Amino acid sequence: SQQGEEDPQALSIQEGENATMNCSYKTSINNLQWYRQNSGRGLVHLILIRSNEREKHSGRLRVTLDTSKKSSSLLITASRAADTASYFCATGGANYGGSQGNLIFGKGTKLSVKP
Amino acid sequence: DGGITQSPKYLFRKEGQNVTLSCEQNLNHDAMYWYRQDPGQGLRLIYYSQIVNDFQKGDIAEGYSVSREKKESFPLTVTSAQKNPTAFYLCASSISGGRNTEAFFGQGTRLTVV
């Protein structure tokens, strides 16, 4: 069952602009992670934010988490053509069924950065 | 170099055949996972293993089987019982089965039924 839902499904911007992607989830979480996937490749971990954190930075990435709204956002500043990829949020549930320890992925946002 | 390796990259299966996808990691991770990804979709969990000689079904285990005889290996067999096997299969590993750990992914195997 899908936990996270990214929004928008697709995003097209020019190089140098900022890209913002959102993720909403349904149940209590322990942490939320963002991953990147280049076309036809595996996923690469970008950043993890715990449920007691509100904001986290890593290079040009900024992630926020609002547990009251059950949502997170990923901001990529000064985007580059090389940022073109799909971005997924994944939640580590606080009480997720019997599949303990597993990440639940959303459907992703497809980002296209035009040079 | 440490990492997680999937093979083959592309696999073609005839109707009614079983095929096995390989996943090997040299990261000394305890936990390993298999996900299925369909076009434009997220990842769905097929099977996971938190320790050698133990594995559990995920959300879509029907038509699949796994084994975990060695820590570094977690092969996935797609059986003839899987009616719609064409998909992109991703293997991942993490230090432990804990929710607070990041997952490391292989480069995937694209399976096509011909």
Image (cartoon, coloured by chain):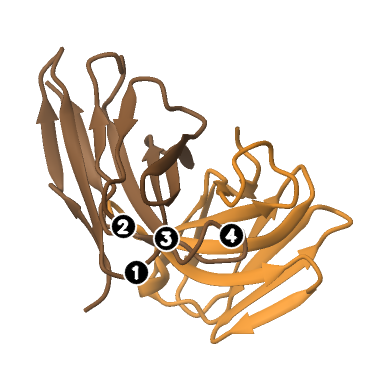
Q: Secondary structure at mark 2?
A: loop
Residue B102's spot in the image, x, y percent?
A: 51, 66
Tell me the amino acid under the disc marked 4. Gly
Q: Secondary structure at mark 3?
A: loop
Residue B108's spot in the image, x, y percent?
A: 26, 50
Residue B79's spot in the image, x, y percent?
A: 24, 21
Numbered badge on residue B28: 1
Rendering quarter of residue B20: top left
Task: Name the side, left or right, on which B108 lies relative to A2.
Answer: left
Residue B9's spot in the image, x, y percent?
A: 15, 48
Residue linked to disc 2: B71
Q: Colour of chain A?
A: orange
Tell me the amino acid under the disc marked 2. Lys
Identify the chain of the residue marked 2, using the numbered disc in the image.
B
Mark 2 vs mark 4, foreground winner is 2
Which chain is brown in the picture?
Answer: B
Say whether disc 1 or disc 4 marks the residue closer to the N-terminus.
Answer: 1
Say whether disc 2 or disc 3 marks the residue closer to the N-terminus.
Answer: 3
Residue linked to disc 4: B98
Is B92 above or below relative to A53? above
Say whether disc 2 or disc 4 marks the residue closer to the N-terminus.
Answer: 2
